[in-house]
Image: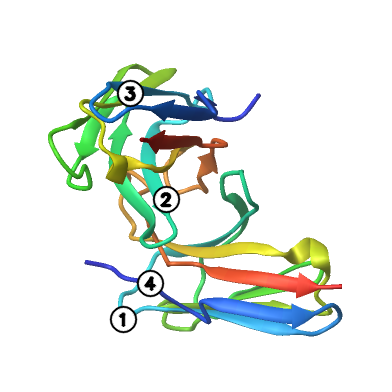
């Protein structure tokens, strides 16, 4: 297995533009998590899915953020409109029950 | 809300020294995991401890889970520059969804 695959690795966009981050979890994993990491706040859980169903989105900062998981092999995190304070590294992780997370390599987002 | 406090936040040592990182909480966790993250990559799972009082060794790394399953420690013997990175502890609360609570992390720098 190639692990959790995220794209793009880097994204630079202008304030106000829509940004879509993509994630392909490990086949067979039943949970998928979106995290945001900054120096100030560390790893923040944004939303997580179990069997493609959103379980807890209380970490999504604002209505500008949305996430979908249309099937077991794909998820997106969308920011519309983006703002400079959204600049961070966004990680996707997948797991099977309470076994350890496998993280992707992340998407470094810069909003200018 | 379950919280995990990691200490120290920063650690800068010379090659060959020993070190211990602590992870503490007032909550009980069903299991606790340790991750290591290198710059530009996602966290990578090092170990999972599930039994109170459990000790696991991974080469020069020793992980311990407290008897009450509220705290954990990571001890590195004879640190090497390759050990440099961000170390994260994460606790599982026993839900079937596998949601983890992450500590803020310890940034370790080992100087040659």
- Look at the numbered discs 4 and 3 and tell me whether their residues touch, using CB distance below 8 Å: no
Quadrant where the N terminus of chain B lies? bottom left
Lateral position of residue A55 relative to residue B40, left or right? left
Q: Which sits in the foreground, A6 or B97? A: A6
Residues flagged by tags 4 and 3 on a common chain: no
Label 2 sits on a secondary structure element that is strand
Say which residue label 4 marks: B4
The span from disc 4 to disc 3 (Cα, nearest Å) is: 32 Å
Residues flagged by tags 1 and 2 on a common chain: no
Residue at 43% of width from left, 35% of height from top?
A109
Q: Earlier in the sequence, mark 1 or mark 4?
A: 4
Residue B26: mark: 1
Say which residue label 2 marks: A37
The span from disc 3 to disc 1 (Cα, nearest Å) is: 38 Å
Q: Tell me where residue A14 appears, x and y as whole percent.
A: 33, 27
Kindly indicate the quadrant of the structure image that contains residue A88.
Answer: top left
Q: Which sits in the foreground, B74 or B84? A: B84
Quadrant where the C terminus of chain B lies? bottom right
Q: Is residue A59 above or below residue B92?
A: above
Residues flagged by tags 3 and 2 on a common chain: yes
Q: Earlier in the sequence, mark 3 or mark 2?
A: 3
Residue A19: mark: 3
Colour mapping: rainbow
């Amino acid at each position: 297995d190639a692990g959790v695959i995220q794209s793009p690795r880097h994204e630079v966009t202008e304030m106000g533009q829509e940004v879509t981050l993509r994630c392909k979890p490990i086949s067979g994993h039943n949970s998928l998590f979106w995290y945001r990491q900054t120096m100030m706040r560390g790893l923040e859980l944004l939303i997580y899915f179990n069997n493609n169903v959103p379980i807890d989105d209380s970490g999504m900062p604002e209505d500008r953020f949305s996430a979908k998981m249309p099937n077991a092999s794909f998820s997106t995190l969308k920011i519309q409109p983006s703002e400079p304070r959204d600049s961070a590294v966004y990680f996707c992780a997948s797991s099977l029950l309470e076994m350890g997370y496998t993280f992707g390599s992340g998407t470094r987002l810069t909003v200018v | 809300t379950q919280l995990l406090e990691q200490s120290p936040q920063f650690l800068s040592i010379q090659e060959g020294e020993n070190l211990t990182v602590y992870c503490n909480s007032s909550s009980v966790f069903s299991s606790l995991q340790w991750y290591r993250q290198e710059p530009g990559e996602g966290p990578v799972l090092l170990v999972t401890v599930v039994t109170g009082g459990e000790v696991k060794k991974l080469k020069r790394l020793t992980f311990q889970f407290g008897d009450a399953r509220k705290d954990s420690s990571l001890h590195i013997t004879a640190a090497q520059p390759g050990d440099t990175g961000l170390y994260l502890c994460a606790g599982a609360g026993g839900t079937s969804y596998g949601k983890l609570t992450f500590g803020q992390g310890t940034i370790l720098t080992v100087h040659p």
